[in-house]
Image (tube, rainbow, N blue to C red):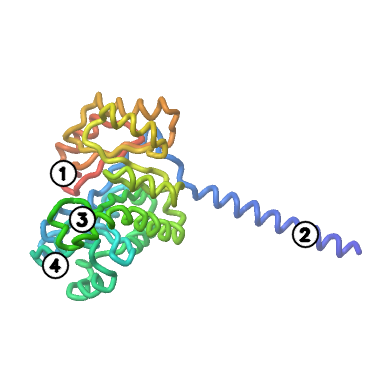
């Protein structure tokens, strides 16, 4: 009887200890919000070059495997442009050109099978990467070079008359459904890689897109509205959409006074978990300007030539 009681006590104690250790370890892996002292330099487009032709073999073009791999070794995080394919898979890419110097269909209008066929024509360093591949690269990178991944969301269904010939009468219908499709596609990625949520920012000009993302994945740490200037209308919009806790804007249109105005706006809302992103430091002069303006929590998106 005594042996039985001791055995049960041992099992209970072991279970409790394991439970405590697992809980402690889980908490220990949580990435805390960026502090007032934190300013991250992250790779714009992964950190490569802006190329009109993404297949230019002489350069390390933005959003390409080689740029992202290099960026994860040079910076404290990366920013990449993302689009969702016709069959609801998120891929990395910005420009309209997907095949040698020709204005081909962009990712929004292609299926994964069509993208795979296009990739098969080129070596792996020139492939159009899926967000899944980029997340895997990011999570395998040491934490000092993978503190934040920022996704700049592209939706070309409402970008002007040129695109009408690709989607014709479906453009107006698709531009609205695209937001939900993208949000659900992102949710699937985050459900598969929950560790990424604390190190993720999503940014876009489209407030409705951010709303859809918040609806399906409210735990994404930073929802960033891209703006040119911090106008009273923008401030009113942010008060209405309290889930938007991040502003992204260009360095060239930002003054120190405006930056402090944005920062004070978030602080007065008693929002300790906020972020301000400046883009893009293309050279060391731009980077010095950004550093002179900025105070954490913030990021500076930079090309490698700025370092």
Looking at the rendered structure, the secondary structure element under dot 1 is loop
Left/right of residue 174 with respect to residue 161 in the rendered view:
right
Which tag, 3 or 1, sits closer to the chain's start?
3
What is the CA distance from the residue labelled 3 to the residue labelled 1?
17 Å
For disc 1, the marked residue is: 282
**Which is closer to the viewer, label 4 or label 2?**
4
Q: Using the image, tell me which numbered label, if any, was put on residue 94.
A: 3
Residue 300: percent from left, percent from top = 26, 40
Residue extending furthest toward the front: 169
What is the CA distance from the residue labelled 1 to the residue labelled 2?
62 Å
**93 up-or-down from 152: above or below:** below
Residue at position x 68%, y 54% in the image: 17
Q: Determine whether label 4 and label 2 are within 8 Å by CB.
A: no
Looking at the rendered structure, the secondary structure element under dot 3 is loop
Which tag, 4 or 2, sits closer to the chain's start?
2
**136 up-or-down from 301: above or below:** below
What is the CA distance from the residue labelled 4 to the residue labelled 2?
65 Å
Which tag, 3 or 2, sits closer to the chain's start?
2
Residue 271 image-quadrant placement: top left
Looking at the rendered structure, the secondary structure element under dot 2 is helix
**110 up-or-down from 235: above or below:** below
Q: Nearer the viewer, residue 152 or 306?
A: 152
Q: Using the image, tell me which numbered label, if any, was put on residue 181.
A: none
For disc 4, the marked residue is: 99
For disc 2, the marked residue is: 10
**Which is closer to the viewer, label 1 or label 2?**
1
């Amino acid at each position: 009887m005594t042996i039985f009681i001791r055995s049960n006590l041992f099992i209970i104690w072991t279970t409790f200890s394991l439970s405590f250790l697992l809980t402690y370890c889980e908490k220990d892996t949580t990435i805390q919000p960026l502090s007032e002292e934190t300013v991250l330099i992250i790779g714009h487009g992964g950190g490569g070059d802006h190329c009109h032709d993404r297949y230019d073999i002489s350069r390390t073009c933005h959003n390409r495997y080689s740029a992202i791999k290099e960026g994860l070794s040079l910076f404290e995080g990366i920013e990449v442009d993302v689009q969702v394919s016709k069959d609801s898979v998120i891929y990395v890419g910005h420009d309209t050109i997907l095949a040698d110097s020709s204005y081909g269909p962009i990712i929004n209008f292609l299926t994964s099978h069509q993208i795979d066929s296009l990739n098969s024509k080129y070596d792996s360093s020139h492939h159009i990467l899926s967000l899944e591949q980029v997340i895997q690269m990011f999570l395998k990178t040491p934490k000092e070079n993978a503190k934040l991944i920022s996704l700049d969301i592209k939706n070309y269904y409402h970008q002007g008359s040129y695109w009408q010939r690709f989607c014709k009468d479906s453009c107006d219908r698709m531009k609205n459904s695209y937001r939900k499709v993208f949000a659900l596609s992102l949710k699937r990625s985050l459900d598969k890689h929950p560790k990424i949520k604390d190190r993720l920012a999503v940014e876009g000009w489209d407030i409705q897109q951010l709303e859809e993302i918040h609806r399906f994945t409210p735990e994404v740490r930073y929802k960033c509205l891209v703006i040119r200037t911090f106008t009273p209308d923008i401030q009113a919009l942010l008060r209405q959409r309290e889930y938007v806790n991040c502003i992204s804007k260009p360095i060239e249109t930002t003054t120190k006074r405006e930056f402090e105005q944005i920062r004070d706006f978030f602080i007065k809302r008693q929002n300790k978990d906020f972020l301000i992103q400046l883009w893009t430091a293309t050279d060391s002069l731009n980077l010095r300007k950004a550093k002179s303006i900025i105070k954490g929590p913030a990021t500076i998106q930079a090309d490698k030539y700025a370092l």
